[in-house]
Amino acid sequence: MTRFMPTIRIKSGQQREYADRVQLKIGLARGGGAYRLDGPVSQAGSACERMQFYLDERRIDADAGLLVFQGWAAIAGPQPAAQKIDLFLTSAAGELELDVYQRPRPDVLEAHPQISHLYCGFYTMIDLSELQEEGYGLSIGIRDGECRRVAFPGQLVVSELELQKKIKLMRECELEQDQPRWFETAQSFFLHEQVTALDPDPYSAEYREQQLQLYYRLTDKDRYDSKQAEVIGHDISGFLDPRPFPCCTGYLEHIGNHLLQAGHIFRELGLREGDAVLEYGAGCGFLTLLLAASGLDVSAVDINPDCIQIINTNASRRGLQIATQAGEFGEAPAGKGPFDAILFFESFHHCLDFEAVLDGFHDRLKDGGSLVFACEPVSEGFPKPWGLRLDGQSVFEIVTKGWLELGFREDFFYELLSRHGWAAEKHDFADIPPIFIATRAV
């Protein structure tokens, strides 16, 4: 049975300095049951009085060959300056830093009101093949650094058979046009990637190749070609007026989310009637047509010719003028530009060569123009600088359509833009993902 989780190797002699000197080592037998461990911190001078470590699940997944841990850590005394929890598995072979998924645990705070500070809930796993002896230990440490709280929705899927079952169920939901059940299934699982094994330089060819190898394993392809992978056939008639996308889905919550997103984008663009805007990855033209109807000079680029035909047909029926091109990121309709704004709406995450694309936009924008990234998967909690997203919805799109579904950690995204001459500001909203607006760095 094929596994999607790479083998985890124990490295000997791993050590880490903890700035706040908080570390607690605990030993575990190989038996079952839950463990509650409570003890003083191991280093003097810490602001914390005691740390409590509770392991409320320790199970062996024999089919996957994994030992899975789930639990929480709490601290008694003043809240430390630390921002991240580390877990290590120790054995005679050495010490291994584990990939940790962190999330809030309000249930623990409710059940244990005496806890002064709950640090986090966690979920981690270890390859059973690495545990050759009967005894092993877990070491928990808390250190300074920006928090990387990564939600772990539902079931960890590590085998090809498990993934096929999830994908099959989601395909059935698509055929039955049962979008609520499709989203419910998508949110019920995720794949694991050993992020501690990634090349430390996210701009390196080695890091990029690691992400492509993961893509090849999921898609059963041996290369990524955007013109082949990102283009799928559409029943064009199903996206035309009077029921264009997203109204044609019939899923009111999904439609409402798109309308909310469009409203916030319009408010934040800072454009006036007659300004020129270029939208990349325009899809079926939901936002494109609204921009044109609002008096903007709109150009649209999408890699899918069917999408361009849908935009052109609906624009003609509405009496709108939109310059379109079936092309890739960085291209533009002939004779158009420079622009007051270049816009990505849920599309930049399909761009593999994002560094070259960002460099090219300096020549396409007017002085004072803006580069807008709306509702893209950029978050503080993304577990790696950039790469494939492994939540259920993204994995479904990767496996069934061959799409490249990337995500970006927020600090890396800012650094990436700065590296290519852009200064960005983040606009947060309560009900939609953030919008990042970049201008040329001074």
Image: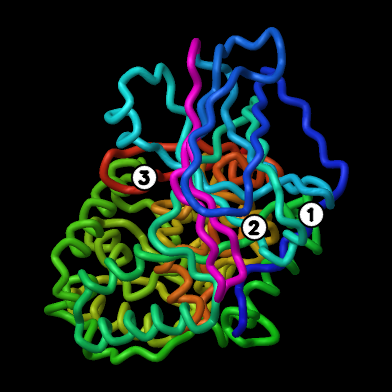
Q: Which residue is mark 2?
A: 126
- Residue 235, percent from left and from top: 29, 92
Q: Give the magenta-colored segment's residue range.
A: 54-78
Q: Which residue is mark 1?
A: 10
Residue 314 vs residue 352, the one in the foreground? 352
Give the SS element for disc 2: strand
In this rendering, position of residue 405 left or right of residue 136: left
- Name the amino acid type tagged 1: Ile
Point out the tag, 3 or 1, that comes first from the N-terminus: 1
Give the SS element for disc 3: helix
Query: Which dot, 3 or 1, sits closer to the camera?
Result: 1
Label 2, label 3: how many angstroms apart (C-alpha)?
A: 47 Å
Circle 3 crowding by C-alpha within 10 Å: few under 14, some 14–19, many from 20 = some
In this rendering, position of residue 191 left or right of residue 89: left
To which quarter of the image does residue 424 belong?
A: top right
Q: Which residue is mark 3?
A: 269
Circle 1 crowding by C-alpha within 10 Å: few under 14, some 14–19, many from 20 = many
Point out the tag, 2 or 3, that comes first from the N-terminus: 2
